[in-house]
Amino acid sequence: MECTHQSTSKKLVKIEYFGLIFSAKMEVCDKCEAHLWTEESKDKLNQWMMEQKREHRDSFVIQTSITNHSKQCLDQIIRDYPSIQASALIRAMTIVFLEFMKRPEASALFEDVAAGDYYSQLCEGEKEIVKVQFNATGMLDLESWSKILAMKNAKIVEEAVYRMTSLHIENDPRLKDFWHNQILPQISMILKSAA
Ligand SMILES: [Zn+2]
């Protein structure tokens, strides 16, 4: 049965994010030790994230590796966005992927694309290391999904790229429609606001 956190105590909690320690006083469940976040403590965390971002720029850089096949697709997509680098496209894809994963019908389509032949082709072969920089919000999103999916941050970025680039070349009409009418417009919007 899920804990309802009936009795809590105020404690100093320390939480590690990307190897850096955030500490704050907050209510903690006596039974399951869950941290009970409030608007105030969330604000404090955001504030802390911003400071860390200024002080430790590298902590928000994710090093991931992408196959050459997938990289070719990225290069193809990016042609429509002059002055945008592959790492910016990867970041936009990851943000959009995480956003759409919250919707059951979209996450089902991402499962479908991962079951397809294009996906398995794109995941194979030589890989190249890519560094992608995220802002505090992006990192928090990645961090919470990484807990839900039990997957490393870098692996989530990789998955986002493989699924997105597979969608880009898919022939299945449902997936094509999903890519052109839902996903790509969101990616475009992020890229254009960054350019
Ligand atoms: Zn509890």
Image: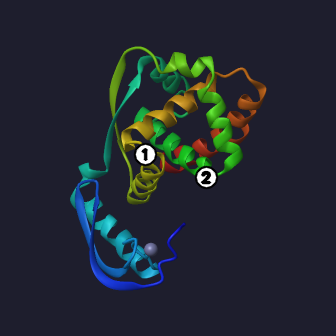
What residue did someone put label 2 on?
Answer: 102
Q: Name the side, left or right, on which 149 lies relative to 65.
A: right
What residue did someone put label 1 on?
Answer: 150
- Queried on whether the Cβ of the residue with tag 1 lies below 8 angstroms from ligand 1, the answer reads no
Instruction: Say which of 168 and 149 sits in front.
Output: 149
Instruction: Say which of 177 and 3 sits in front.
Output: 3
Residue under the point 41% across and 14% down: 125
Question: Measured from the top left, where is residue 136 in percent x and y?
Answer: 38, 59
Decide: is 138 above or below 120: below
Residue under the point 67% across and 43% down: 106
Would residue 88 be seen by someone viewing this image from the given angle? yes
Q: Earlier in the sequence, mark 2 or mark 1?
A: 2
Instruction: Say which of 108 and 168 sits in front.
Output: 108
Decide: is 172 above or below 59: above
Amino acid found under the numbered disc labelled 2: Lys
Decide: is 113 above or below 21: above
Q: Quadrant location of ligand 1? A: bottom left
Question: Measured from the top left, where is residue 167 in percent x and y?
Answer: 63, 28
Dot 2 falls on a residue whose secondary structure is: loop
Residue under the point 59% across and 47% down: 101
Residue under the point 33% across and 65% down: 50
Amino acid found under the numbered disc labelled 1: Ala
Q: Name the side, left or right, on which 124 lies relative to 184.
A: left
Instruction: Say which of 142 and 4 sits in front.
Output: 4
